[in-house]
């Protein structure tokens, strides 16, 4: 395909470059003004803005079915209700939830995702297959990391079972995690079945969802799988203060220090959230070449805190941007995630503009940073010859890009995804003239409306149990959050950042 008459955005240049872009065999072959090709299909860009596809570095396919469920919920509240809101779904329901998220991401200019998918009470190959198929059908690029643990959230809350009335304690104890062997086998089987399939558009990573809910044996075996199969590793990292305090109690060290001891840090490691870090944690992440997925929307809604992104950048950590799941962030819109990522540090550092994240920096996080987190730094996240043709065309005559002043600022602060006109993944058009090419969007949405009601009715008794348990979880969370915890040393400046 020859994409003719577009302005190619590059955050390192002050103005987009007017050019034609030739795509062949899934890659960008050439970019030049006046470029033509005798054998290419022509797509008329009509002066639109061509950008690299955005990369969602942390999301959850299972969460899309729960949009609008939460309001004033901490992460611990969400985990208390997880069996009720996430559990006991059919493969079709998992497919529909994943498809909903993929559709929303494509519609808002996102072409790649790092998806930590969860299946409760225990993972099944049918559910994982369904999630992969949803991404394939919509046409997105995805790295699927089955979200696994061989322990439960309730067991990780100190003193919870003793605090509960006998009947509720028995019910909470009865919720059992899969065995270590089971979760390891699921990870191995998923890697062998799906990694580097569909022309490389589907990849697989290992995941220990929240390290504090996992045995040391599972963490050790995750490290073995990562080395044996040369895949990535993704986990929730020090997302809340109770998690950070519990890790210190359990291991006598931080979560980051424990993961470094196990051998999981490194260029293939991505930690989501990374809020409750020490100065040593930040140094370990930087020295090991690890990545962090910054999720400002869910961090704000759940009251988890503000991640030390300027400090992480100063230490050389690769920072990407994610939306997190729709139960806590409410949407899968990477433009909103970018805007929040740029703005949140202005509240944390008033009148220290050198510590603020600028539009060019946040753009890099949402494209090249995400590509690096997915292990695809030389493949996506940039419009250049040799890179995969994961590109998005925005209309320049829409309300969010008018007047067209500074492109980087408009994309980071003004655009919402409403200007998206065409989306291409791996040289394949998946959205054109505002319409999805590969799936019947209306049929999926219609089926979802019925499915959501069915899932809620099926899990009503689990919701009632969660309501009884929640006050005790909340009290323990408050006690953990009241303990002292020394955070990072604060001396970042823009001059220190790469």
Image (tube, grey):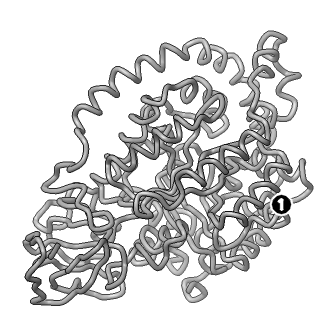
Quadrant where the image shows the N terminus: bottom left
- Seen in the picture, residue 146 relative to 444 is either above or below; the reply is below
- Seen in the picture, residue 235 relative to 149 is either above or below; the reply is below
Determine the image quadrant of residue 40.
bottom left
Q: Residue furthest right?
A: 252
- Would residue 105 be found to the left or right of residue 276 on screen? left
Q: Residue at x 54, y 84 (%)?
A: 494
Q: Residue 101: x and y, percent?
A: 39, 44
Q: Residue at x 50, y 77 (%)?
A: 353
Q: Secondary structure at mark 1?
A: helix
Q: Residue 68: x and y, percent?
A: 42, 32
Q: Residue at x 81, y 15 (%)?
A: 170
- Would residue 439 be found to the left or right of residue 276 on screen? left
Crowding at dot 1, Cα within 10 Å, few <14 / some 14-19 / many 20+, comes out as: some
Residue under label 1, please give it: 258
- Seen in the picture, residue 228 relative to 132 is either above or below; the reply is below
Q: Residue 127: x and y, percent?
A: 52, 35
- Would residue 59 be found to the left or right of residue 170 on screen? left
- Seen in the picture, residue 196 relative to 495 is either above or below; the reply is above
Q: Residue 323: x and y, percent?
A: 46, 52
Q: In the depicted view, which residue is nearer to us: 330 or 225?
A: 225
Determine the image quadrant of residue 361.
bottom left
Quadrant where the image shows the C terminus: bottom right
**Count of numbered tags:** 1
Q: In the depicted view, which residue is nearer to us: 489 or 9?
A: 9
Can the viewer see residue 159 in this picture? yes
Determine the image quadrant of residue 399.
bottom left
Can the viewer see residue 295 in this picture? no
């Amino acid at each position: 395909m020859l994409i003719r008459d577009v302005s190619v955005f590059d955050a390192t240049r002050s103005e987009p470059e007017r050019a034609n872009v030739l795509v062949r065999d899934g890659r960008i072959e050439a970019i030049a003004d006046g470029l033509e090709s005798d054998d290419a299909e022509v797509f008329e860009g009509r002066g639109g803005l061509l950008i690299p596809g955005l990369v969602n570095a942390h999301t959850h396919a299972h969460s899309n079915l729960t949009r609008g469920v939460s309001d004033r919920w901490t992460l611990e509240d969400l985990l208390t209700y997880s069996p009720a809101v996430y559990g006991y779904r059919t493969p079709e329901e998992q497919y529909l939830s994943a498809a909903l998220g993929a559709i929303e991401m494509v519609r808002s200019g996102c072409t790649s995702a790092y998806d930590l998918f969860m299946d409760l009470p225990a993972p099944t190959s049918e559910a994982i297959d369904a999630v992969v198929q949803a991404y394939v059908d919509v046409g997105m690029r995805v790295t699927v990391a089955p979200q696994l643990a061989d322990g439960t959230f309730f067991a990780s809350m100190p003193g919870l079972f003793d605090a509960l009335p006998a009947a509720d304690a028995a019910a909470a104890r009865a919720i059992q995690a899969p065995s270590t062997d089971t979760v390891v086998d699921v990870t191995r089987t998923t890697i062998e079945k799906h990694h580097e399939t569909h022309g490389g558009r589907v990849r697989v990573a290992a995941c220990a969802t929240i390290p504090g809910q996992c045995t040391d044996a599972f963490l050790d075996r995750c490290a073995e799988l990562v080395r044996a199969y040369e895949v990535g590793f993704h986990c929730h990292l020090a997302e809340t203060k109770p998690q950070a305090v519990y890790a210190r109690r359990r291991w006598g060290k931080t979560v980051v220090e424990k993961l470094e001891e196990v051998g999981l840090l490194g260029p293939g490691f991505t930690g989501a959230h990374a809020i409750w870090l020490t100065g040593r944690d930040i140094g370990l992440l930087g020295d090991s070449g690890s990545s962090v997925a910054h999720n400002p929307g869910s961090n704000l809604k759940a009251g988890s805190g503000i991640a030390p992104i300027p400090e992480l950048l100063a230490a050389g950590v690769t920072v990407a941007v994610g939306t997190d799941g729709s139960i806590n962030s409410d949407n899968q819109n990477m433009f909103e995630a970018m805007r929040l990522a740029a703005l949140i540090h202005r509240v944390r550092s008033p009148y220290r503009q050198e510590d603020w994240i600028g539009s060019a920096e946040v753009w890099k996080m949402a494209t090249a940073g995400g590509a690096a987190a997915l292990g695809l730094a030389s493949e996506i996240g940039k419009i250049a010859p040799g890179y995969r043709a994961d590109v998005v065309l925005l209309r320049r005559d829409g309300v969010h890009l008018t007047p067209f002043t500074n492109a980087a600022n408009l994309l980071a602060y003004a655009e919402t995804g409403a200007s998206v006109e065409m989306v291409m993944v791996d040289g394949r058009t998946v959205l054109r003239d505002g319409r999805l090419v590969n799936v019947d969007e209306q049929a999926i949405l219609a089926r979802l409306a019925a499915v959501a009601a069915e899932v809620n009715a099926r899990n009503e008794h689990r919701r009632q149990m969660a309501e009884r348990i929640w006050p005790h979880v909340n009290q323990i969370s408050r006690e953990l959050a009241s303990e002292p915890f020394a955070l990072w040393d604060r001396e970042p400046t823009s001059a220190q950042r790469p």
